[in-house]
Image: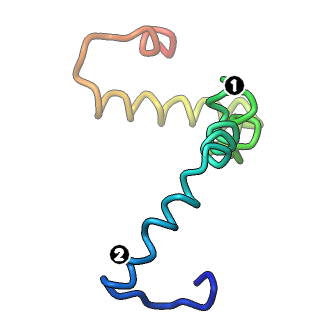
Amino acid sequence: MRNGINHIDKLDFLEAYPLARIEAFKSETIKNSFGAAGLVPFAPDRVISKLDIRLRTPTPFTEKELRRQASSIKALLRTRSRSPPSPLDRALN
C-alpha cells in the first residue's frame, strides 16, 4: 500500500479521512479525471480509440466456413428467439 501502510483501524481512518478527502477531491483532480474519461470535453472517439477490442469470432476465410458460421447463427437465433422474424432473420434467410 501507499506509504507502507498495510492496515488502518477505525480511529486512524476517521483521523486520516478529512485530509485524504481534500487531496482526492481537488478540482484539478476531478477535471483531469473527467478529461481522461473523455467526458469533458465530450470526446468518445478518444476513449474508444484506447479500447483493446478483439473480435470473438474470426472472419471466415472460405465460403464453406461462412456457410457453417451462418448455419450456427441461424440455429442460435431459432433456439433463443421465439419472437416474430426480425430484419436480421429475414436477411439471413
Q: How many marks?
A: 2
Which percent across, then down, holds residue 19?
51, 67
In the rendered image, which residue does mark 1 sit on?
41
- Side of 71 where 3 appears, left or right: right
* Screen quadrant of the N terminus: bottom right
- Side of 23 where 51 appears, left or right: right
Which percent across, then down, holds residue 76?
38, 35
Foreground pick, 65 / 34: 34
What residue lies at 28% left-to-right and 26% top-to-bottom? 81
Which percent across, then down, holds residue 27?
61, 43
Which percent across, then down, holds residue 89?
42, 15
In the rendered image, which residue does mark 2 sit on?
14
How would you rate the neighbour count of disc 2 (Cα within 10 Å): few for under 14, some for 14-19, many for 20 or more?
A: few
Q: How is the image coloured?
A: rainbow
What residue lies at 76% left-to-right and 36% top-to-bottom? 49
Mark 1 lies on a secondary structure that is loop
Compared to 55, does 1 lie above or below? Answer: below
Marks 2/1: CA–CA distance = 36 Å
Which comes before the other along the chain, label 2 or label 1? Answer: 2
Mark 2 lies on a secondary structure that is helix
Compared to 30, does 79 lie above or below? Answer: above
Say if mark 2 contacts mark 1, CB within 8 Å: no
Residue 12: which quarter of the image? bottom left
What residue lies at 48% left-to-right and 60% top-to-bottom? 21
At label 1, the amino acid type is Pro
At label 2, the amino acid type is Leu
